[in-house]
Image (cartoon, rainbow, N blue to C red):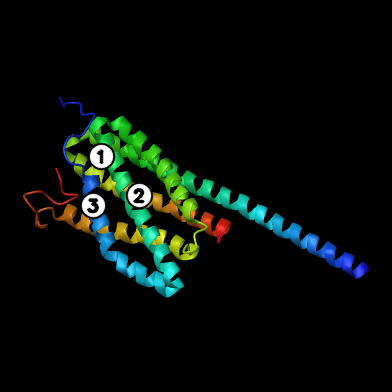
Amino acid sequence: MSAVSTAIELAVEASDADAAKATAGASSAGFAYGLAAIGPGIGIGYLVGQAVQAMARQPESAGQVQTTMFLGIAFTEALALIGFVVFILLKFA
Amino acid sequence: MTAFVDRLEGPSPAMEIAKDMVTRGLWAVPVGLGLGALAAGFNGAVSVAYAMALVLVNFLLAAYTLAAAARVSFALVAGAALGGYAVRLGLILIAFLLVRDASWMAKVPFGIAIIVTHLVLLVWELRYVSASMAHPGLKPSVSGQPAAGSRR
């Protein structure tokens, strides 16, 4: 009888451990996603600010500035996408 | 005295670049599907196709937002870039959450395909744009339009 209760206790502990692991994983994934979005946010803000300043100062080069700005934004967003992928892999895979 | 310019008229280079990348992305779809199928069978191929579609739509949405904002004002460009970034990240998350429990969703190929497609298309386009910026006269143009990146 005591063996059965011990097994039940172990199962309950294992279940709690799994739940705790899942909870920790979910919160870590959320933090990872949030933290991964901060850097690109700062980067895009700085990049666009400088690009807008360049376009206002030299409108004749606005085409090239816009091209470079768009590519820069897309490269910066790749960091956020990596964070997103880490998030879905930690949380759902 | 230089005239103050607070918005841009005419076709947007960002939109041209995005269309270029979508065209190249469509060429890359069979390769992606093949790699997805090798990694995780039919489910992998479908997941990779979904991821590639998300990346291409993301590029088009980003370019359209910037182009539309640039026609209004530069201040709106800054707002559209940052706001659009947050909104598009949210849209990608929603697009994933909608299908996360689907039987065909293979999450690892899906995630890898998002990153790889995004970076490969960007590097591919960057090589093209760098070349046309360095040698703007060499790119053959269609109907008299200069190449993307060499405009203005």
Q: Mark 2 highlights which residue?
A: B58
Q: Dot 3 falls on which chain? A: B
Sequence-earlier tag: 2 or 1: 2
Q: Position of residue A14 (x, y in %)?
A: 76, 62
Above or below for B54 versus B71: below
Numbered disc 2: secondary structure: helix
B106 left or right, relative to B116: right
* Label 1: few (<14), some (14–19) or many (≥20) C-alpha neighbours in 10 Å: many
Cα distance between the residues tagged 2 and 1: 14 Å
Sequence-earlier tag: 3 or 1: 3
Sequence-earlier tag: 2 or 3: 3
Q: Position of residue A21 (x, y in %)?
A: 68, 57
Mark seen at residue B19? 3
Q: Residue at x 27, y 30 (%)?
A: B73
Numbered disc 3: secondary structure: helix
Q: Are marks 2 and 3 on the same chain?
A: yes
Nearest the viewer among B141 and A1 is: A1
Q: Are marks 3 and 1 on the same chain?
A: yes
Nearest the viewer among A15 and A65 is: A15
Name the residue at the front extreme: B103
A35 left or right, relative to B54: right
Q: Mark 1 highlights which residue?
A: B67
* Callout 1 amino acid: Ala
